[in-house]
Amino acid sequence: MEHMKHRLLECQWSPEEIAGRLRVEYGKCIISTTTIYRAIYSGWLNAPKASTVSVIKKLRHRGKRRKKRSIEEKRGKIQISHDITERPSGAENRSEIGHWEADTVVGKQGKACLVTLVD
């Protein structure tokens, strides 16, 4: 813990650098970057409050929280203006020509696409 504290506060290493160096020196994952970040934010370093704030300001996001995107993707979606219940009876029993039905099938990797058209 003291080794990590020295590198973080005095050498100004990032949590990723500290975890990577420990992995190189000891051959396995001694401590993860997530654990180091938790130690910084919860104050386990026993550093003065001003020092903890200055450490947070030197981190990758500089203490700023990332905004989660909860917006639904709207690109590439076709807006359907009418419902299937509004379908004419001639199209339902297939007695009239000219009522087209279309469907698409996208391949597993998203590279291939198949379009079917039925009159």
Image (tube, helix red, strand yellow):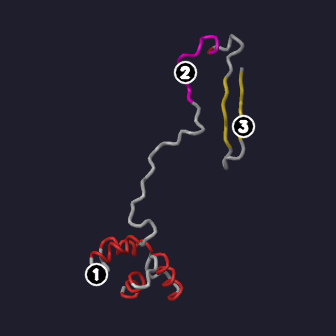
Q: Nearer the viewer, residue 38 or 96?
A: 38
The question of residue 47 being in magenta is answered with: no
Q: Counting other residues with Cα less than 10 Å from the Cα at mark 1, is it few (<14), some (14-19), or many (20 or more)?
A: few
Residue picked out by circle 1: 46
Is residue 48 left or right of 117 when viewed as pictured?
left
Q: Is residue 21 above or below residue 55?
A: below
Residue contact between numbered discs 2 and 3, judged by CB atoms under 8 Å:
no
Q: Is residue 26 above or below residue 42?
A: below
- Residue for badge 2: 82
Q: Earlier in the sequence, mark 1 or mark 3?
A: 1
Choose the circle earlier in sequence order: 2 or 3.
2
Q: In x, y percent, where is residue 33?
A: 44, 74
Q: Residues within 10 Å of mark 2 (few under 14, many from 20)?
A: few
Distance from disc 1 to disc 3, alpha carbons, whole Å, reads: 62 Å
> Residue, x 59% and y 12% (percent of image)?
88
Magenta stretch encompasses residue 90: yes
Q: From the viewer's perspective, is 22 left or right of 2?
A: right
Q: Residue 114 — which label? A: 3
Q: Position of residue 28 (x, y in %)?
A: 51, 83
Give the SS element for disc 1.
loop
Q: Quadrant of the N terminus?
A: bottom left
Report the magenta residues as a range: 79-91
Q: Amino acid at mark 1?
A: Asn
Q: Nearer the viewer, mark 2 or mark 3?
A: 2
